[in-house]
Amino acid sequence: MASLNVAIAFGVRLLLVLLFLPFSALDKILNFKGAVGQARQAVHATGPATLLILIGLGVEIGMSLCILTGFADRAAAFVLAGYCGVTALLWKPFWAPGDFWAGGKGRELFWDFLKNFALAGGFLLITFGTGAGTVENFFADPLASSQPYAVQAKP
């Protein structure tokens, strides 16, 4: 039963990071020029756009690995939650096209915007825990592991 518990805990974490590792990270690596072009839509210059993509790549790979391994996973989840929020604000501006009610690009971006924030909520569950009694743990030691794969013996 303990191995099933660990497998489920790992599977849940894998589902949370699957978008970033391997898919988004691999897309940035294999289509680096296209990723920089997309980033230029937000910053309008190649140098800063390249830097944004490199930072994003580091966040997607590094934080995802931390969440999967349990190493400083709460801090990593906090960073990924912020990353989801920032990318939603920069690349999913549903308010910009002006065609929200007409069923155009604005509505499509709106759902992607909400998905980013919903994913951020999942990461914040790792950061703070599932109840009010566990929030303090993060503030007491933000770099500590949540020990996601520890199986507690029943009394």
Image (cartoon, helix red, strand yellow):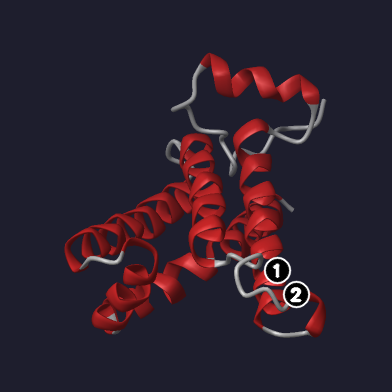
In this figure, which residue is indicated by the disc labeled 2?
100
Name the amino acid type tagged 1: Phe
Please name whichever residue, 127 or 107, is drawn nearer the observer in this view of the structure: 107
Image coordinates of residue 114 in percent, x first then y, are 71, 61
Q: Quick one: label 1 or label 2, which is nearer the N terminus?
A: 2
Left or right: residue 135 versus residue 62 is: right
Question: Up-down: is 132 above or below 126?
Answer: above
In this figure, which residue is indicated by the disc labeled 1?
110
Within the image, what quadrant is residue 39 found in?
A: bottom left
Q: Residue at x 47, y 66 (%)?
A: 20
Within the image, what quadrant is residue 29 found in?
A: bottom left
Label 1 neighbour load within 10 Å: few <14, some 14-19, many 20+: some
Image coordinates of residue 115 in percent, x first then y, are 68, 64
Discs 1, 2 touching: Cβ within 8 Å: yes
Name the amino acid type tagged 2: Phe
**Label 1: which secondary element:** helix
Within the image, what quadrant is residue 3 found in?
A: bottom right
